[in-house]
Image: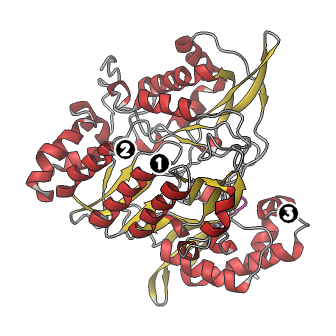
């Protein structure tokens, strides 16, 4: 560790910060292996439970001896052997289920402390890790899941993402941040890595330098969701491809040394940027990096919301990728193992997870695709799913999450099943379920969002949802706005039906839901929901 914890004398540090001053989060990894896996759940020091996150481990609700373990991913890309290992872990230790998150990671539930060292070993043996998939550190880097095969990619970011990931992973200079540090790097013109909702993002740009057009990146800073959402702000910086790491490092140093450590709720980078302003933050970055070029021309043209269903040609001649639906991100160990075998035998030995909780199989010979998609697995995991089933995201919910107020995945199944039977849509409508205000289900960027809560009724306390609409990351982005306060969960499907029929009746040809809301105004949609 080559830095000084200049905040250590702050008398107003929150409890987590005080714990981190006594023990670095990375220290917990060996303690899990050498101590707690042998002495058992009841022996775990309560202070150490919070540090388990640095190992990629969270205590699972209802805190009775089980854990969630999240695997660190980069751009959501894994090889077939790694996917088979994940399937094996799910089968042996996760009751046969793995979950894909809205950042393209894979996580397991029902993990016992005595089994964690073996999981660590299995992951290490195939070149993976759960370390720093959680905690106040640099999280898994999101990127373009199609990097290297994407016909719409201006820059293959594989080597850049690897360089940045390898620099931060287990680097004790950056293992004690005020809160998590989320990085997004993509060279696609379709904003495939959700730039505006990450702490720092790099999106494709071009600039003429000394008479030559140079492909590089624009830099965005200070995005994030949770209960106080912020859209990232674009800096007046053009980053050459070789600049990405030093800029990401500089921002992390600034965040580490100046971020807020008194109240956890204000500890994210977005609050520091808001207080300092863009110009001051840019100036601080350049003090660390040296001179940087001013911004060039944006090359992002639109946002695909990370959906890739169907069969698509790759930039490699004669090759295609297939995007398939993993309903609400939940996949059985058996299906994951079968997809890995398909990738091994028929593709480029890779599976790619998406930020919409789905999976892509890449590198398939064009002439092999028709026969491939006849496999039975694609009836369970369709390549062209029903509209509402295929375009609905759901967070973990209160089945496992200690923060979630309501159950989400089964509710999402009920609602989407109802809507798919009732309404035929030409243009998909993106619906997100999130169990609490922390918004792991990313309510702010969906066409329609449902945020869980509880209400008092004549029949007692019941699950309920607040409804939101109009979220998008097109352009600079626009967060969803509230449509209706807490409503009985059993009634929301009927309210959604009214809203969707209003959209279907009044939209212009080719107009997506959020564009419709922006044109008609949020109040008209509110009225449609109430009628």
Q: Position of residue 324 (x, y in %)?
A: 60, 64
The correct choice, above or below, for 241 with respect to 345 in the image is above
The correct choice, above or below, for 406 with respect to 189 in the image is below
Q: Residue 95's image quarter?
A: bottom left
Question: Marks 1/3: CA distance?
Answer: 36 Å
Left or right, 363 with reference to 461: right
SS class, disc 2: loop
Residue found at the very far right of the displayed protein: 509
> Is residue 486 found inside the magenta-colored segment of the image?
no
Q: Position of residue 317 (x, y in %)?
A: 72, 45
- In the picture, the quarter occupied by the N terminus is top left
> Is residue 470 found inside the magenta-colored segment of the image?
yes
Question: Marks 2/3: CA distance?
Answer: 42 Å
Give the crowd class for mark 1: few <14, some 14-19, many >=20 residues within 10 Å.
many
For disc 2, the marked residue is: 128
Q: Residue 124's image quarter?
A: top left
The correct choice, above or below, for 268 with respect to 514 in the image is above
Camera sees residue 258: yes
Q: Are marks 1 and 3 in contact (CB under 8 Å)?
A: no
Camera sees residue 471: no
Residue toward you, 356 or 531: 356
SS class, disc 1: strand
For disc 1, the marked residue is: 78
Question: Marks 1/2: CA distance?
Answer: 9 Å
* Camera-side mark, 1 or 3: 1
Residue toward you, 68 or 312: 312
Q: Position of residue 507 (x, y in %)?
A: 87, 69
For disc 3, the marked residue is: 511
SS class, disc 3: loop
Q: Are marks 1 and 2 in contact (CB under 8 Å)?
A: yes
């Amino acid at each position: 560790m080559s830095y000084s914890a200049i905040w250590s004398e702050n008398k107003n540090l929150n409890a987590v910060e005080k714990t981190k001053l006594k023990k670095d989060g990375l220290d917990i990894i060996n303690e899990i292996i050498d101590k707690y896996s042998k002495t058992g759940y009841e022996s775990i020091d309560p202070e150490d439970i919070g540090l388990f996150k640095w190992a990629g481990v969270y205590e699972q609700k209802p805190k009775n001896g089980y854990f969630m373990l999240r695997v660190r991913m980069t751009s959501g890309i894994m090889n077939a052997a790694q996917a088979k290992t994940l399937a094996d872990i799910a089968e042996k230790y996760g009751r046969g289920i793995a979950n894909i998150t809205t950042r393209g990671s894979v996580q397991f539930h029902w993990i016992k402390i005595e089994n964690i060292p073996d999981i660590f070993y299995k992951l290490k043996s195939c070149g993976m890790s759960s370390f720093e998939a959680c905690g106040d550190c640099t999280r898994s880097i999101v990127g373009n899941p199609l990097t290297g095969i994407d016909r719409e990619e201006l820059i293959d970011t594989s080597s850049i993402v690897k360089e940045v990931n390898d620099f931060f992973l287990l680097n004790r200079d950056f293992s004690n941040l005020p809160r998590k540090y989320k990085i997004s790097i993509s060279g696609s013109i379709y904003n495939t890595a959700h730039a505006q909702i990450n702490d720092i993002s790099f999106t494709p740009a071009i600039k003429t330098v000394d008479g030559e057009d140079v492909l590089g990146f624009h830099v965005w800073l200070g995005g994030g969701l949770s209960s106080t959402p912020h859209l990232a702000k674009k800096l007046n910086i053009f980053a050459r491809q070789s600049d990405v790491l030093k800029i990401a490092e500089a921002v992390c140093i600034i965040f580490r040394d100046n971020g807020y450590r008194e109240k956890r709720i204000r500890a994210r980078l977005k609050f520091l940027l808001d207080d300092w302003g863009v110009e001051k933050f840019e100036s601080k970055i350049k003090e660390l990096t040296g001179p940087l070029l001013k911004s060039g021309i944006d090359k992002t043209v639109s946002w695909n919301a990370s959906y890739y269903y169907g069969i698509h040609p790759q930039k490699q001649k004669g090759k295609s990728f297939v995007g398939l639906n993993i309903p609400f991100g939940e996949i059985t160990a058996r299906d994951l193992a079968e997809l890995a075998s398909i990738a091994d035998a028929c593709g480029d030995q890779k599976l790619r997870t998406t930020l919409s909780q789905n999976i892509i199989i890449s590198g398939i010979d064009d002439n092999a695709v028709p026969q491939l998609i006849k496999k039975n697995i694609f009836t369970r995991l369709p390549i062209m799913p029903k509209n509402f089933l295929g375009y609905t995201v759901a967070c973990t919910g209160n089945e496992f999450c200690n923060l979630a107020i309501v159950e989400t995945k089964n509710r999402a199944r009920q609602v989407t099943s109802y809507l798919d039977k009732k309404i035929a849509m030409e243009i998909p409508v993106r619906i997100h379920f999130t169990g609490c205000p922390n918004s792991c289900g990313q309510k702010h960027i969906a066409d329609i969002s449902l945020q869980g809560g509880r209400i008092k009724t004549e029949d007692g306390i019941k699950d309920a949802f607040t409804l939101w609409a109009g979220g998008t990351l097109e352009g600079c982005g626009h967060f969803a706005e509230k449509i209706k306060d807490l409503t009985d969960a059993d009634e929301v499907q009927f309210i959604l039906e009214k809203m969707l029929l209003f959209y279907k009746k009044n939209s212009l040809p080719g107009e997506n839901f959020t564009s419709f809301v922006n044109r008609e105004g949020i109040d008209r949609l509110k009225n449609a929901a109430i009628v």
